[in-house]
Image (cartoon, helix red, strand yellow):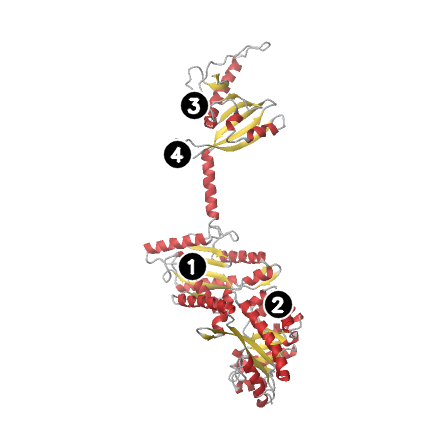
Amino acid sequence: MTKNRCNGVAVLRRGPESSPTSHGLTGDEALREQPVEGVHKPSADSVSANEALMEFLYRAPIGLLQISALGAIEMINPMSARLLMPLSPDGSLFNLFDVLEATAPQFRRMVQEYREPSGSVCEAVRLKVPPSSKANLPPQVLSVSLLKLDENHLMAMVSDVTLESQREQSLLDKKLGEAARLDKLTMMPNRTSICEFIERGMQRQDRDQCHHFSVLFINCDRFKQINDSLGHSAGDEVLAEVASRLMRTMRLRDSHNGQYENGLMAGRLGGDEFVVVIGEPQSESDIFLVAERLLRALSEPYRVADQQLHLSVSIGIVHSTTSSAQPDAMLQDASIAMVEAKRRGGARSVTFEPSMHERAAGRAQMENDLRRAIVNQELFVVYQPVVMLGPTVDQWSFPRHAAAVEALVRWRHPVRGVVPPAEFIGVAEECGLIGALGEFVLDTACRQFVAWKAQLGRLAPRLLAVNLSRAQLSDQEFVAFVSRTLRDSGMDPAELQLEVTESLAAQDESVQATLRQLKASGLSLALDDFGTGYSSLSSLHQLPVATVKIDRSFVSQAVQSAHHRVLIEATVRVAASLNMNTVAEGVESEAQASVVRSLGCEKGQGYFFSKPLLPESLVDWLKSNDS
């Protein structure tokens, strides 16, 4: 084993009989050892050890080279020459820094800035070798480390890490691919993964006609209110808990996969929309039981930001035997069924039927028409009187005045004529237009009420009642809007009564906080549709209301049902003990009016007294009933 000089560089060779090194690196003359004065000739053992070291350096699977502080190559083994030669612009290996200048110019600077007498300058710095123009191969990747030996010498190590780099890139690509299929908030499969899973189910169904599967589309009811009232971080906490409950209920332990050999997948489409795919054949009744189990699990109270929140979900179910043969279309069908569940009151599941497509198209058309109606001022307000229930029939049939009027929105469609509220209020809630409708009604009704006072004097209604929606109560600017509307119209706050449904007032702490703010501004509050929601007589004292409106479902049964009469009387007594007024809604006959009067109701409202009237018709009604 000898050292040869290649262009002035010491190159390790196995001896004079060895073949030339790669890339034409042949040694010229064997480097002769020059005697040095005062140095003894090496012993045989020393020569043997040196030969063994040379053999190791020659056979080393990594490149080794010694350089000066300025980068001049003083010693290089064949592996280094083989790896570095493609980087040399002129085919020479005189200076390592020059060789690496085009690919990694930072090495020269790193050595200059390294002030320690010895140590590691850098470790495993990777650089790409430009691919050969003659070979269509991926770029080679080298790893270079520099070790400072002393002030004047450094050792460089060069290795080929192309395969390792390819494996790392492949692993990274795999992780990125998996991440692209996961929802970042919940780490559940996202829409892409869900559609792929459904696609595989469809392909299996094509091969095996007996195979079928089902999709459950889950949407949180009134989730927007949580974001609006508590902020998006609280909303994210709720969504994460929904995902966790969903996985536990479906017995899916690994949310990163979201699926197991039992053919199940649970994932998040986005927002507050989740999906469960049941990939193994089950009967429709079994699927329904799964939906019921999910409804119960997801409706348990949530504890977020030191508040207990009540959240329900609506579920749309679609079976592969009744839906389209495309994943997106199947999800759309499940979504249509979910919207139908919301339309029926939410907190329930509905199975998709092809006829729902027509209804969905009708709702979409209704939404477009409603948006146009707001712009074109096709909406108007009617007013239904609320009368005092006197001790005799004559006194309630011909009241001297309306104790109050309730403002109700109507829509005069340019083609369909007057559209019933039942047809468009739900659509307005679903598409986010209910807030705009509510503001229109409040502003219009307040101005009309002030005009009646100026026009009618003592005949004018004493109180104006306006219904509130969840969207309005969730709007942080709503209290300010009410104050501004009262000020601009010139209406006394004490003459305005805002009505909120029992289920809305009793469920949500943030809604109750808004109601307390409204009450503090001087207006009064009424609990609408009492008896149909979540509160009870025992909790009535907790609500900041002055009036309880007994739902029409109780009034309609009051004549023939002793049970309903007992409930009405109990409500009247509890309300009276709390200094609250009572109004019987939906009074449609003299018999009903007589019963609710005998049970202690102070006021009545319904078609027996008057249907909702246009402003000018209400004036005529008031004048005709003035005795």
Residue under numbered circle 1: 331
Tell me what residue is drawn at x 33 percent, y 58 percent.
Answer: 210
Question: Which of pointers 3 and 4 lies earlier in the amino acid sequence?
Answer: 3
- Is residue 238 placed above or below 449 in the rendered structure? above
Q: Is residue 69 left or right of residue 430?
A: right
Secondary structure found at label 2: helix
- Is residue 435 placed above or below 49 in the rendered structure? below
- Residue 481's tag is 2
Spatial distance from mark 3 to mark 4, Cα to Cα? 20 Å
Callout in the foreground (2, 4)? 2
Callout in the foreground (1, 3)? 3
Q: Position of residue 404 (x, y in %)?
A: 60, 80
Q: Amino acid at mark 4?
A: Asn
Q: Amino acid at mark 1?
A: Leu
Residue under numbered circle 3: 23
Question: Which of pointers 1 and 3 lies earlier in the amino acid sequence?
Answer: 3
Secondary structure found at label 4: loop
Question: Which of pointers 4 and 1 lies earlier in the amino acid sequence?
Answer: 4
Question: Which of pointers 2 and 4 lies earlier in the amino acid sequence?
Answer: 4
Residue under numbered circle 4: 136
Spatial distance from mark 1 to mark 2, Cα to Cα? 39 Å
Q: Nearer the viewer, residue 554 or 394?
A: 394
Callout in the foreground (4, 1)? 4
Secondary structure found at label 1: helix
